Image: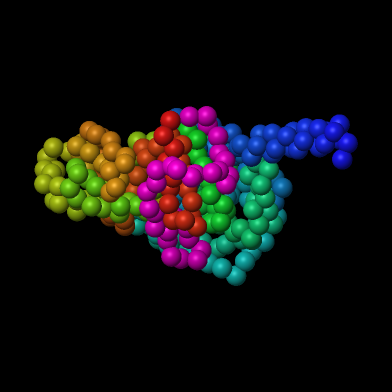
Amino acid sequence: MHPIGLKSVIFCLALFLIFKKVHSQIPFTQDANGHILLQVKINGVNGKFIFDTGAGLNAIFTGFSKKIENIRSSDTIHGQRATGEELVLNLYNAQTITIGNKNFTGQQYAIIDLKAGDIDGIISLQPFKTTPVTIDYLQHLIFFNQDSQGFSSIPIECSVSPKILDIHTDVLLNNSIKAKVELDSGAGQHSYWFAKKYMDSLGLDKADFDSITVKSDFGKSNVNYKGKIKSLSTVNKIIAIQDLNVSFVEGLIYDGKTSIDWIGKILTIDIPQKKIFIKAR
């Protein structure tokens, strides 16, 4: 090949790689509660969606459902929300779900009769069963298939239901009591819920906590005991936070449920490897 031709090929390849890198970055915003808000296309129609690692399945709200063709599948979900509300949801087959420049096929979603301002629905971890997804809270960007070699990591467990996908990890409360918590980006920031039984395990007095009855969007009321604990850490001790505000929740179906940003500011959720990789920065 002529030298000039070779240089041209290299130059074009470099431009292609730069272009590909730029378009693999998906910007997100956060609302006042710290929810991750993404622009997503479902069946070719753009909307604003919460990226919710604790949702289990994709969902669109009724208003958005009227903008697209909804193809009913034969699948139905019988499940529970974290605070025990029973849910029975029909599933619909998405023609396409597009995030950034990546199309995800074979996806399903439920339709939920909720109104949440200009939010059109929820994107769960379902599209990322085989695609590691990185949340960069510092730059407010989402990446796919980032190299995590050499990063610290914590193990995760994935739900076993073929139609539900969420993630859990073991943590230590006050450096002594082990609990398995759901990691829930949909909880926003600084959200730490634990089953009420752990108040006894930790030797906590209810009189030192504020008792508040909280009613969910689905109508169920649960008593929350709000106060402080000394520490929360991953079992392998690579991440720990001190003196945090928590809620001990009556009727919580998990040992615990926490937001995800406390683990790190640049996180890669890798479902195939069953790990979250944490980039120090």
Q: Answer left or right for 179 relative to 199.
A: right
For the record, the magenta segment spans 138-167
Name the residue nearer the viewer: 34 or 80.
34
Residue at figure coordinates x 69%, y 34% from the top left? 18
Instruction: Please check the rendered image and state whether residue 151 is part of the magenta-colored stretch, yes or no.
Output: yes
Q: Position of residue 202 (x, y in %)?
A: 15, 47
Q: Would you place residue 241 above or below residue 68 in this image?
A: above
Q: Position of residue 57 (x, y in %)?
A: 51, 56
Residue at figure coordinates x 61%, y 36% from the top left? 25
Q: Position of residue 118 (x, y in %)?
A: 57, 36
Name the residue nearer the viewer: 212 or 152.
152
Q: Would you place residue 175 above or below residue 136 in this image?
A: below
Q: How is the image coloured?
A: rainbow
Q: How many marks?
A: 0
Instruction: Please check the rendered image and state whether residue 106 is part of the magenta-colored stretch, yes or no.
Output: no
Name the residue nearer the viewer: 271 or 173.
271
Q: Residue furthest bottom?
A: 74
Residue at figure coordinates x 87%, y 40% from the top left? 1
Whether residue 214 is visible here, answered yes or no, is no
Query: Looking at the rendering, which quadrant does residue 92 occupy?
Result: bottom right
Residue at figure coordinates x 57%, y 52% from the top left? 131
